[in-house]
Amino acid sequence: MTYADENRYPPSAPTGWPLPHSEPHGITPRHETYGQNPWPESYGHDAPRYDSYGQQAPWDSPYGHEAHRHDRDLAALRSAYRLLRRVSTLTALGSFVVYVVLSCYAPGLMGSKIAGELSLGMTLGVLQLVVTFAAVFWYGRSAQRSVDPLARAVRERAVPAGRNAGVAR
Amino acid sequence: MNDFSSGTQAIVLVMFTTLVTVTLMMCIMAGPDRDDLTNFYTGYLSLTPLKNGLAIAGDYISAATVLSTTGIIALAGYDGYVLAVSTALSLVLLMFLLAEPLRNAGRFTMGDVLARNMPGRAVRIAACVVTLSATLPFLVVQLSGAGSLLTFILNIPHAAGARTACIVIIGSLMIIYAAIGGMRGTALIQMIKIVLLLGTSVVVAALVLNRFDWSPGDILRAAQHGSGAGPAFLQQGLQLGTSPVDRLDFVSLQFTVVLGVACLPHITMRLYSAQDVPAVRRSMSWAVGTVTTFCLLVIIMGTGAAALVGSRYITAADPHGRTSVLMLSQVLGGPPPPRA
């Protein structure tokens, strides 16, 4: 007997994995505040955590829709987080790397005076510190705009499903 | 060793003893109520983002940061500036990369997260070894800096075991603070410390700038003169050297600081005592703001020490320059020392 939506929505947990009910119950629920994986980059252990939300496998229950939308929300949340982190880290670390390498291997450039006794190297250093304030503010605002609404949506959807036993708060 | 008069010396001793007693008492009062292990480490989740952020900043700005970085700036100029920038940037990287995932994972340190992802004894042992090998040298540097400063302040003579005894006393005091106060008690101590540190640094930096009539060019010129190295003070090379290998050394030092200092366990532990993830973000904002302000002040103070005290006197007191802040405040507060 086939369910109506079996072909439209691929199963959320790839085949070959143990079915959710056979999972050892010793695994503590790892549902964090936003219900997302703390390490989005896969360390090889990313995938099994899908099970927690993939428990409602489409062939199992009438909540197939929910599980799939949930996974899409999770994926959106995770990629938003990933983008935010990558952009901010690359900017901060990248400018610092350029600064250090320049000051090491182009000492003449960094020593050139630009305003009285002030050298380019010193100015760049102080500028980096001053820009940090703006960077932190920008990060907070970006996170609030892009990540927080998604996280809230994921959590609200997770809570009614009643799967978040023992959310660490 | 220092040229405090005996009256000043007595005042210093009394103030030191009072400070230790008062902070110890506050630690006892703020500590956990019963033998509650979880709340010992999480502080009852009662710290607001501001308090938590200040505590993180206080933990981050250690004795080594204050004393050594100022000393390196005073003695080596540009190398110290880059070091100050790395110190501030490390916390920024922690905020961007690790703070929220760490809080989400519900674990205290990076080792805990590793052990959680890959359960098993070998992983835990590896995490322990790495943590210890990162923390032990850090601890040694902190205690030796604090011991030097204490012998300098209390004017303890250069007897054979005097410095060692000071270090042992300071180490025991730290253990007592941590054991009695738990997360909340130590957070209170760190908050007081960072407020005092920021306040005094602002005063010292303002005095330095005032002495030179608020013109950065004058300070830099005097610093170049006082360090005895001229224009090399404002270029990379005084701390480690200018050969290609030394430059590589310099680059790797900065990377180690940027990538490593903020991930030490005593800092990441404080993230878990925040209430939830938005609170972590806010407390990290406070922490980064405080640390960046402090690094800017350290740059001013270090340059002022090079300009007003001179590298000869600094290296005479301590070859690493760890007493430069103290000597700078001495100079600012009293008549200038005789210069050759």
Image (tube, coloured by chain):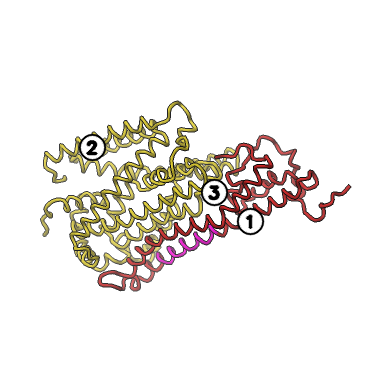
Chain colours: A red, B yellow
Category of crowding for the residue at label 3, using alpha-carbon neighbours closer than 10 angstroms: few (below 14), some (14–19), many (at least 20) = many
Asked which secondary structure carries label 3, the reply is helix
Task: List x then y, in percent, for residue A145.
Answer: 54, 57
Give the image quarter of residue B16: top left
Q: Quadrant of the C terminus of chain B?
A: bottom left
For the residues beneath circles 2 and 1, the answer to whether they share a chain is: no
Give above or below for B317 relative to B185. Answer: below
Residue picked out by circle 2: B16
Q: Inspect the image, locate mark 1, and give the three-letter code of the amino acid beneath it.
A: Ala
**Apparent side of residue B153 relative to residue B336 in the rendered image (left or right):** right
Magenta-span inclusion, residue B104: no
Tell me whether the residue at label 2 lies in contact with that at label 1, contact meaning CB atoms closer than 8 angstroms.
Answer: no
Q: Which residue has dot 1 on it? A: A76
Residue B101, label in figure: 3
Residue drawn 40% across the image and 64% down it = A100
Mark 2 and mark 1: Cα distance apart in space: 55 Å
